[in-house]
Amino acid sequence: RFEQSGDAHSSGDESKEMSGNVSIMRLAAVPIRFMGHFPDQVERLALLAEESSLTTHASPQCRSACRYFAIVLAGLMKGLDREEVLSPDWEPLRQLRGNVALHPEVDAVAAGSFRNSEPPEIKGSGYVVKSLEAAIWAFNNGQDFSDAVLSAVNLGDDADTTGAVCGQLAGAYWGESGIPGEWIDGLARRDLIETALTGLLDGS
């Protein structure tokens, strides 16, 4: 589609059948880069997150999941308490709902569906909504970074992506110091990751 139109905003598939979890798996770069929009420009941050999904995943479920996930990550990165950020009455979430309604399935997650379910109802699925729910469930119940991420991965199914989505939450909350040293030491091309991160932080 992009080759035909040259427009990345319209290249993603809008159908529910294509509501995979890839755009939330890669989302952390958006709140890292645009942290300055939180909390005073929540809608702007959410819009940028939504736009990051459009190139590949343009369904209402994916777009809405990116909007919600971005403000959650931003709140955690700002050092807010986990319970506050995941509250269904969190003020930035109210602002988000007031501007553009979340997709009903995503809103159910934001309202706390992850608190009322356990595996096997919680699934590490490739479907964006179930993936988001599973990652938040693991994060909410995690005692530390590794506990949260391993809980996400051990749900099985689309384990790598569930782990990646949960890892963004856990990293935003516990920080780099919370990641086990042996996990960091085992990263392939850590230099590329750190260079990219530096670019995000300084806006280059």
Image (cartoon, rainbow, N blue to C red):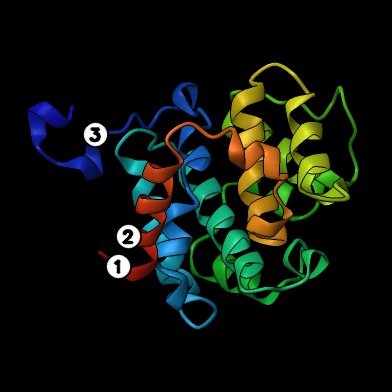
Is residue 109 visible in the rendered image? The answer is yes
Q: Nearer the viewer, residue 103 or 27?
A: 27
Q: Nearer the viewer, residue 176 or 101?
A: 176
Identify residue type, mark 3.
Ser
Residue at left offset 44%, top offset 66%: 45
- Is 164 situated left or right of 191 in this image? right
Find the distance from the CA under tag 1 to the CA under tag 3.
26 Å
Which quarter of the picture shows residue 174?
bottom right
The x, y position of residue 204, in whole percent, is 25, 64
Identify residue type, mark 2.
Gly
Query: Dot 3, how many residues are within 10 Å of its Cα: few (below 14), some (14-19), or many (20+)?
Result: some
From this view, report whether residue 101 is shown above or below residue 95.
above
Residue at left offset 50%, top offset 27%: 20
The residue that mark 3 highlights is 11
- Is 104 situated left or right of 100 in this image? right
Find the distance from the CA under tag 3 to the CA under tag 2.
26 Å
Q: Are marks 2 and 1 in contact (CB under 8 Å)?
A: yes
The x, y position of residue 34, in whole percent, is 40, 68
The x, y position of residue 108, in whole percent, is 72, 47
Q: Nearer the viewer, mark 3 or mark 2?
A: 2
Q: Secondary structure at mark 3?
A: loop
Q: Earlier in the sequence, mark 3 or mark 2?
A: 3
The residue that mark 1 highlights is 203
The x, y position of residue 8, in whole percent, is 21, 41
- Quarter holding the N terminus is top left
Residue at left offset 69%, top offset 58%: 177
Say the numbered circle drawn on residue 167. Answer: none
From this view, report whether residue 160 is shown above or below residue 115.
above
The residue that mark 2 highlights is 199
